[in-house]
Image (spheres, grey):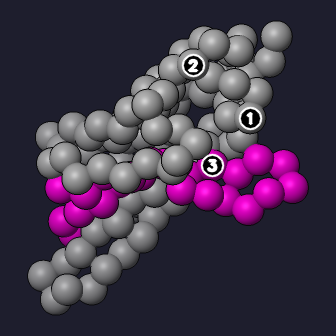
């Protein structure tokens, strides 16, 4: 059974930092992409950051220079280091994992989400 377990969310003051982690388990195909999305109240889910392979990263313009995505392939874990947080970063953050099997079928998995609230 595939599970994406997210951790690290919470309440932080503006200007503060948080580190999210997402541990993937039960995935038998090859993981090629891992990322984070977020959804704020009344808004669509949007890409925050994504990493493919070892270091091919992509960031939303709104988080460039403040957030850093990384992955540990051995641990099947993806991290999101968030700094200089603002109230506009408040959202539910979702982990996303994409994999491919030997028949080139692709799979996409989502975590349940972790709340990040930036407020004084």
Quadrant of the rendered structure where residue 117 is?
top right
Residue 3 placed where, x, y %? 44, 53
Pointer 2 residue: 84
- Asked if residue 22 can be seen in this view, the reply is yes
Badge 1 element: helix
Residue depicted at x 67% and y 59%: 45
Q: Which of 4 and 18 is in front in this view?
A: 18
C-alpha gap between disc 1 and disc 3: 11 Å
Range of magenta residues: 26-53
Relative to 43, residue 61 above or below: above
Q: Are marks 1 and 3 in contact (CB under 8 Å)?
A: no
In front of the other: label 3 or label 2?
Answer: 2
Relative to 63, residue 102 above or below: below
N-terminal of the pair, mark 1 or mark 3, is 3
Residue depicted at x 60% and y 12%: 16
C-alpha gap between disc 1 and disc 2: 11 Å
Magenta stretch containing residue 11, yes or no?
Answer: no
Q: Do the residues labelled 1 and 2 touch (CB within 8 Å)?
A: no
């Amino acid at each position: 059974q595939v599970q994406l377990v997210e951790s690290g969310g919470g309440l932080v003051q503006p200007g503060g930092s948080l580190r999210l982690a997402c541990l993937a388990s039960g995935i038998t195909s090859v993981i090629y992409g891992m990322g984070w999305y977020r959804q704020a109240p009344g808004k669509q889910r949007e890409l925050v950051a994504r990493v493919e392979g070892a270091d091919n990263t992509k960031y939303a313009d709104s988080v460039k220079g403040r957030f850093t995505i990384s992955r540990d392939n051995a641990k099947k874990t993806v991290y999101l280091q968030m700094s200089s947080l603002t109230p506009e970063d408040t959202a539910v953050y979702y982990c996303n994992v994409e994999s491919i099997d030997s028949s080139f079928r692709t799979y996409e998995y989502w975590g349940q989400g972790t709340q990040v609230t930036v407020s004084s």
